Image: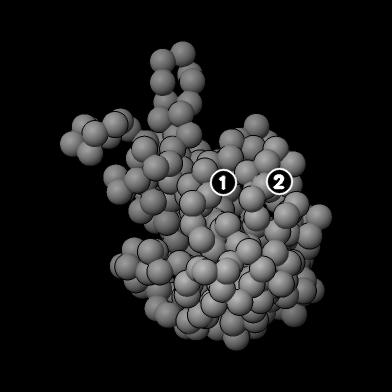
Amino acid sequence: MAASSPLPPITLLPASAPDFYPIAALEAHVFYQEEFSAVAFGPTRDSPQNLLLREKTLASQPKENGSKNVVTKAVILKEGGEEELVGAAGWSFHLRREDGVANGEIGEESIADGKGEKKENGWGEGANVKLCEDVFLGAEKHIARSTEGRNYAKLNTLVVSPKYQRRGIGKLLIEDGLKEADRLGLQAVLGASKEGLGLYKKYGFTEFEVMEVRLWEYEGGEGMGLDKHVVMHRPAVK
């Protein structure tokens, strides 16, 4: 679709079981060419087995008491009720930490623009466990510091089809999640790649911790450069 073509109406809907595999496939397609993705998740990162693992993660709920995961899809509705998936966002809402009820452990969920949620069978077939643990579990520790034991919302994944990028779909998905966070009076956190920093800053997120990742130090990253993952924080709207 040409950039000048009118964007068809976008509808945001709650994702359900049939949506999770297509969302997983869209994530794999969007992030496949990134150096970080190649090193972290390996050459089989878009295999059916890994997509099924990611599907299961998207469908799961956190173990932490009082928390919930919400996945929203952005679609174009076609004639006959057919949907074209053009984007998705996944949020987790941690609501009972201040009551002393939460009992989840750091590391059960992770971040980084939708590429960081730990899969049941390790990090997926062919993944670089050392890199995943250094980045994603390290990011969780920074999130714990930034939220200071208080309730929060976390953006776990944000993905838009390349065909429709830079058309405002990502903004719609972010605004939808932040609307719920604000309704609940929650601070918000996320993990951003350098490409996403500008967008998130527009919504009040600030850099809390910049993690520099020397990809060349990890197996499979020989000859690659420096990557950055940034933990960002947005105060609760009062």
Q: Mark 1 belongs to which amino acid? A: Ala
| Residue 72 image position (x, y, % from top left) | 53, 45
Looking at the image, do the residues carrying marks 2 and 1 touch, with CB atoms under 8 Å apart? yes
Q: Quadrant of residue 203?
A: bottom left
Depth check, front residue: 17 or 140: 140
**Crowding near pointer 2: few (<14 within 10 Å), some, many (20+)?**
many
Residue at position x 74%, y 41% in the image:
49
Q: Earlier in the sequence, mark 2 or mark 1?
A: 1
Q: Is 200 in front, or is 130?
A: 130
The relative height of residue 209 versus residue 230 in the rendered view (above or below) is below
Checking the image for residue 50, the label placed there is 2
- Residue at the far front in the pictured view: 223
Residue 73: image x %, image y %?
Answer: 51, 41
Q: Secondary structure at mark 2?
A: helix
Q: Is residue 88 visible?
A: no
Measured from the top left, where is residue 184 in percent x and y?
53, 65
User: What element does badge 1 sit on?
Assistant: helix
Give the position of the N terminus as an image quadrant: top left
Residue at position x 77%, y 74% in the image? 105
